[in-house]
Image (spheres, helix red, strand yellow):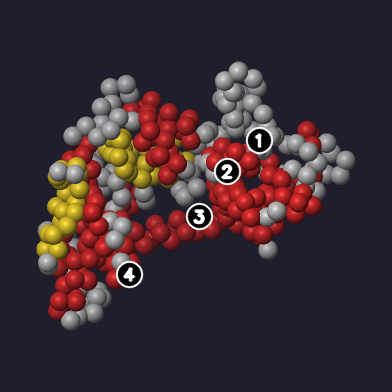
Amino acid sequence: MNGCMKAAGLAKPGQPADMLPKPAQDPAAPPSFEAPGASGAAPSNKFTREILAAQDSITSSKLIALLEADEVFVKFSKAEGDAILARDQEDAEKLAVGIDFAIGKGVLESKEFPPYAQVDVFGKSADQVAAEIVAALGADFQGGVLVLVGLSGTGKGTTVSKLKEMLPSATTWSNGNVFRCLTLLAATQCLQEGLELNKSILTPENISSWMSMLTFGKFESGFDIHVNGLGHDMYVSQVANTVLKGPLIGKNIPTVAEVSQGEVVKFASDACKLMGESGQSVLLEGREQTVNYIVSPHRFELTMSDAKLIGMRRAAQRVGAKAQELIEQVPAAVLRETCEDEVEASIKMALSHLIS
């Protein structure tokens, strides 16, 4: 590392860059940032344009290693971590209300759920986390439903992407399109009857009727949701990015979702079960309150034994994205006014922009 990041507060005056604190790492673990090249040479610690452009877990790890002693970054990370925990708590409370509502009207049962196997992601790359889950599934795993939960910032989405590459016939499931289909039918009925779409129309009877117009199965194009009712006859795969992304749908989804969690969860559980039994590896990640009801023996929770790293990962993602934007837009000569290394200059500039 050159002297650039010292100016950003990474080192005390007179402290050589190579004396900066290093992140704790399992001595048995492989190098956490870069794997050796094909020649078998030791990995380089240089933060290259290629690493920044990748915008992946390696980028984030390198950024944390570079900035973890910077007081400004530490403060920014804490704010990001606190915001994540607050949002997660707020989301959990809202989902709990929806689930309790579904239990109250008899759509879901109140019951105990099987425990989740915990996977600590601290100090591990996304590839290592995914490999740990695959190992836990066992060598005889031939498809099924895999449920993944965890706090925001623990890498659920990245882990799902890695698992999709590693598991046989892997696919992902999201409840989003089911909510969109339900909202489409609710909005259509309101338009046909000249009504406003509000909670008065979202009765258990109407929601049950609209759900009966949705069928999940294997059709000519593969597994899909068929919408058939109120003048609609379409498959989600054909309209997911057109009809279901229309403004009438988007603005009404929160209202519909608030009172239909139970119906959508049951639909999702049946759909995932059908795909899993066909030999597909169905990957489902989400909030524990809803995915609890997805029937599967393969249940994993991503945890972070060092909680402050959740905020650091999110902060690193934001700094990395901004740095990539700057290095593409700001002339090299301007970047070098901050630091002779353009990548480190863009990182320093990005952090300054984000806290201003």
- Identified by mark 4, the residue type is Pro
Eyeballing the image, is 251 above or below 294?
below
Q: Name the image quarter holding residue 236.
A: bottom left
Q: Helix, strand or loop at disc 2?
A: helix
Asked whether 287 or 172 is in front, the reply is 172
Q: Quadrant of the C terminus?
A: bottom right
Asked whether 191 or 88 is in front, the reply is 191
Eyeballing the image, is 236 above or below 248?
above
Q: Which residue is mark 4?
A: 247
Q: Are marks 4 and 3 in contact (CB under 8 Å)?
A: no
Q: Which residue is mark 2?
A: 53
Eyeballing the image, is 166 above or below 196?
above
Q: Helix, strand or loop at disc 3?
A: helix
**Residue 82: x, y in percent?**
56, 56
Q: CA distance from mark 3 to mark 2?
A: 28 Å
Q: CA distance from mark 2 to mark 1?
A: 23 Å
- Identified by mark 2, the residue type is Ala
Q: Are marks 3 and 2 in contact (CB under 8 Å)?
A: no
- Which residue occupies 26% across, 31% down? 143
- Label 3 neighbour load within 10 Å: few <14, some 14-19, many 20+: some
Q: Helix, strand or loop at disc 1?
A: loop
**Residue 2: x, y in percent?**
78, 38
Q: Which residue is mark 1?
A: 23
Left/right placement of residue 329 relative to residue 233 reads: right
Q: Is residue 309 visible?
A: no
Q: Helix, strand or loop at disc 4?
A: helix
Q: Is residue 345 visible?
A: yes
Disc 2 versus disc 1: nearer the observer: 2
Q: Quadrant of the N terminus?
A: top right
Disc 3 versus disc 1: nearer the observer: 1
Closer to the chain start, of discs 4 and 1, is 1
